[in-house]
């Protein structure tokens, strides 16, 4: 009897902690949604505090599209994110196949080059990178962001780890059957690596969509700016328009939320399956 | 004679094999080499020059570095970055570990809780910091309102003032990163064999003992990975500092400036590119040293 009672109190505290944690994590978002439909003066009202205001100001959501070129920002960011994600997936898995399953000269040296730059903070070489991009005339072009993000060492590293988990015998059998390495990659490796590809998709999507420093440095013309810069610019110009700022923030969060909800299952699985813990 | 032809044949096969492999790597590697590798090498040279991007570069040897250590702003940035690191890393590690242990149990709605704790990491920084800044607004924000009216705190703190600003940054970072590292810990926990716990139960171990003598040691390499990733991430802090401490115009003063912000200021505002690279190299050296120390410590522990 004593043991069950102990278990039950243990369980109770467990759920208590979890609920507390959920509140801590989620309250900022709840508050954001609530504030996004309030008039400017209502936003900070605590006595009384209304989660949903008496007269919800849905017009906030209409107004932000006109106050700043939000549509253009979203358009830019979407194009950028889709292109980068696609290129990343393609070139990373392509290169990772060679590192994981093929033998060739300089293999280790080349791979060490990749690994070394992962540990290196981007900020260490962002200055010469900027100078180089400027010389190439890529300044203030969305293409610059594509070049920077699409060829990451992290993608290659992650896919290689995953590919190493696929048994060599599969590739061997295919080679004996006369398949070229390219077909092996396309027909065998690619389909099998769906969890890793999903994880890489989420990582790349989230990183590119949320990127702030990159676009800040490279994109100067307003029509080329991405959604993060646009939102921040808006916040700087209209510091007192609290309701509008919250509505804008909510809009910016939605795409990532959708992608995340759909693929969140893979996120946990993906990180686990790349053997990072080992 | 036959042997020579054999050797030639093998070498030809090897060359073909190499070429195929290179064709796989080429798309990614060329982009990588041009846009990452070369700038990295360039970065190490730039630190020894004085250049504004337009006029000719001049080599100044170690001048940038001697200037650095007398530079008040640089020293402030260095101090703040280190404090921020010391605050964020242990707190995040403990929180994420605790969450992972809890959510590794058979709890109802486990998936929901995992998703919820992960979401702050995924959410856009600009959006989330704007919410935090409003929540913690010293006079109008709900946090101080609750402190004042519910907990009867006489003078609720100014979270963005120069005394507490680093703390606010740390709290925000812990909130944002915990979910991500929780997932990494979860992966590590799932690798621990259940038999170990069964044996522990047989020996009469209670929950705390199980954690201390089974879970914690088994999570060794995961903890190592987490601490290194966290440290590197914290040293690189920029966005969080600018958006939490930057006020309306995104400028940081001595109480909140961080290394990367200083690099950006010097490079893209003052166009003092050589000096900026020198600061960047100090950042790199710092990250390298701390990482090496951790690797050393890890090796010692393993012996």
Image: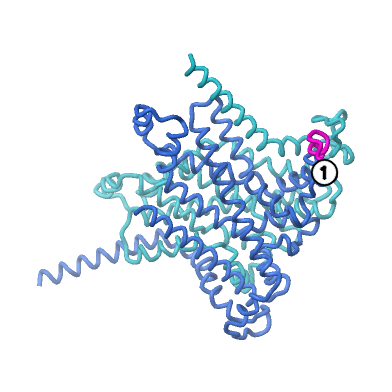
Chain colours: A cyan, B blue
Can you give x and y, in whole percent of width and height, for residue A111 in the image? 40, 61
Q: Quadrant of residue A59?
A: top right
Drawn side of residue A30 relative to residue A210, left or right: right
Q: Is residue A249 magenta?
A: no
Q: Quadrant of residue A29?
A: top right
Furthest-top residue in view? A1
Drawn side of residue B62 relative to residue B126, left or right: left
- Residue at the spot 73% in from the left edge and 64% down from the top edge: B254
Taking the image as drawn, is residue B31 in sight? Answer: no
Can you give x and y, in whole percent of width and height, for residue B178 in the image? 58, 43
- Residue at the spot 44% in from the left edge and 41% down from the top edge: B216
Q: Is residue A8 above or below residue A155?
A: above
Q: Which residues are magenta?
A: B145-153
Can you give x and y, in whole percent of width and height, for residue A101 in the image? 33, 53
Q: Is residue A3 above or below residue B275?
A: above
In the rendered structure, the residue with mark 1 lies on which chain?
A
Furthest-left residue in view? B1
Circle 1 residue: A244
Count of numbered circles on the image: 1
Can you give x and y, in whole percent of width and height, for residue B230 in the image? 55, 52
Say what secondary structure mark 1 lies in.
Answer: helix
């Amino acid at each position: 009897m004593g043991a069950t009672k102990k278990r039950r109190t243990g369980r109770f505290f467990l759920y208590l902690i979890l609920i507390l944690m959920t509140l801590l994590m989620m309250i900022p978002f709840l508050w954001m949604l609530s504030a996004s439909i309030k008039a400017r003066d209502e936003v900070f009202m605590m006595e009384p505090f209304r989660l949903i205001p008496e007269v919800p100001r849905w017009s906030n959501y209409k107004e932000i599209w006109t106050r700043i070129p939000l549509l253009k920002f979203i358009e830019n960011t979407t194009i950028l994110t889709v292109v980068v994600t696609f290129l990343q997936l393609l070139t990373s898995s392509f290169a990772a196949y060679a590192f994981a399953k093929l033998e060739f000269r300089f293999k280790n040296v080349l791979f060490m080059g990749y690994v070394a730059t992962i540990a290196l903070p981007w900020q260490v070489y962002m200055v010469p990178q900027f100078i180089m991009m400027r010389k190439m005339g890529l300044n203030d072009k969305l293409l610059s962001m594509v070049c920077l993000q699409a060829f990451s060492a992290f993608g290659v590293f992650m896919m290689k780890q995953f590919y190493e988990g696929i048994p060599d015998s599969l590739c061997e059998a295919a080679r004996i059957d006369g398949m070229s390495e390219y077909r092996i990659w396309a027909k065998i490796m690619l389909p099998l690596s769906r969890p890793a590809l999903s994880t890489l998709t989420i990582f790349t999507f989230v990183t590119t969509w949320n990127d702030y420093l990159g676009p800040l440095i490279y994109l100067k013309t307003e029509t080329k700016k991405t959604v993060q810069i646009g939102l921040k610019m808006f916040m700087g110009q209209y510091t007192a328009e609290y309701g509008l700022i919250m509505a804008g923030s909510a809009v910016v969060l939605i795409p990532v939320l959708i992608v995340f909800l759909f693929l969140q299952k893979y996120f946990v699985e993906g990180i686990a399956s790349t053997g990072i813990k080992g | 004679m036959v042997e020579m032809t054999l050797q030639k044949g093998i070498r030809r096969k090897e060359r073909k094999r190499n070429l195929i492999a290179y064709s796989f790597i080429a798309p990614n590697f060329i982009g990588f080499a041009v846009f990452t590798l070369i700038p990295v090498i360039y970065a190490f040279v730039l630190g020894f020059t004085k250049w504004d991007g337009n006029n000719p570069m001049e080599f100044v040897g170690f001048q940038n570095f001697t200037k650095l250590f007398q530079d008040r702003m640089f020293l402030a940035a260095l101090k703040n970055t280190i404090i921020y690191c010391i605050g964020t890393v242990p707190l995040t590690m403990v929180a994420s570990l605790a969450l992972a242990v809890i959510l590794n149990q058979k709890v109802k709605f486990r998936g929901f809780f995992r998703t919820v704790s992960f979401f702050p990491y995924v959410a856009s920084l600009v959006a989330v910091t704007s919410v935090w800044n409003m929540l913690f607004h010293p006079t109008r924000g709900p946090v101080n309102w609750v402190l004042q009216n519910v907990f009867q705190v006489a003078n609720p703190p100014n979270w963005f003032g120069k005394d507490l600003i680093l703390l606010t940054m740390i709290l925000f970072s812990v909130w944002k990163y915990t979910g991500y590292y929780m997932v990494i810990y979860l992966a590590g926990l799932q690798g621990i064999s259940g038999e170990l716990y069964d044996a522990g139960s047989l020996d009469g171990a209670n929950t705390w003992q199980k954690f201390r003598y089974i879970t914690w040691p088994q999570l060794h390499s995961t903890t190592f990975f987490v601490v290194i990733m966290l440290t590197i991430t914290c040293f690189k802090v920029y966005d969080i500092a600018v958006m939490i401490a930057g006020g309306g115009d995104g400028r940081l003063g001595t109480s909140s400036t961080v290394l990367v912000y200083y690099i950006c200021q010097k490079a893209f505002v003052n166009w003092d590119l050589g000096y900026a690279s020198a600061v960047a190299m100090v950042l790199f050296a710092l990250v390298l040293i701390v990482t090496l120390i951790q690797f050393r410590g890890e090796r010692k522990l393993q012996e």
